[in-house]
Amino acid sequence: MAKFLSDTELQSINSWITKLERGGRRSYAETDVIEALRLRYKLMGTGKHRLVFDMGNGYVLKVARKKSGITCNRNEVVLYEQAPRSLQQYLCEIVDYGDGWLIMPNMQRTVHRRKHAKKLAKIWKRFLKFGVNIHDVLRKNNRMIRAGNVRLKNKKELVIIDYGNWHIERNSG
């Protein structure tokens, strides 16, 4: 049983995820996904693999929009649960999850790229030491922050809100 979702919402999400897992199509249009889910939440953002809904209670709901989105959500849950506390502090907390969906706090404070680039690079190196293959946070060409995937937890602490494309290659932590 989900902590933040009603039985109807959970049933709707599970029905959508089942369709994704069984269906032959690799991807669906954003409008098709929203129509199938029938959720009461405002769409906050659309990524390559997932839709993000503002739940209106300080949390966001990430739902897979295609099969790879199921994997992204699973990656985030596994990394969050397996990361040592010293690394977990940099990952946005996952407060609830199920097959193809997860819920985390709605982090609003955006990051100034130049101001926080060195700090994020240090965090990036810590994850690499742990054996995490990182994507989607630093731009490959100049190692600047992809500001859309990082937020400020408070005035100084960085938190990564999208780590679904990250993979644990080895556990050396």
Image (tube, grey):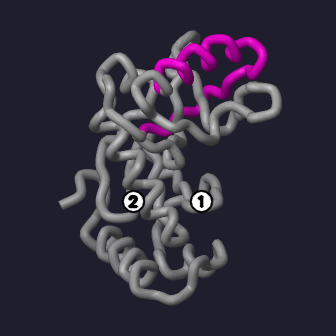
Q: Nearer the viewer, residue 148 or 9?
A: 148
Type of amino acid at the residue the image marks with label 2: Trp
The tag on residue 43 is: 1
Label 2 close to label 1 by CB (< 8 Å): no
Assign the magenta stretch its main secondary structure.
Answer: helix
Q: Quadrant of residue 18?
A: bottom left
Residue 135 percent location from the top left of the image: 60, 41
Residue shown at the point (40%, 79%) measured from the top left? 21
What SS does tag 1 mark? Answer: strand
Residue 41 percent location from the top left of the image: 50, 60
Figure check: 93 above or below 74? above
What SS does tag 2 mark? Answer: strand
Q: Is residue 33 left or right of residue 130?
A: right
The tag on residue 126 is: none
Say which label, 2 or 1, has the lower sequence index: 1
Residue shown at the point (25%, 69%) measured from the top left? 7
Figure check: 107 above or below 12? above
* Quadrant assignment for the C terminus: top left
- Let me know if residue 2 is in the magenta part: no
The tag on residue 101 is: 2
Residue 15 percent location from the top left of the image: 36, 80
Q: Magenta part of the protein: which range?
A: 105-127
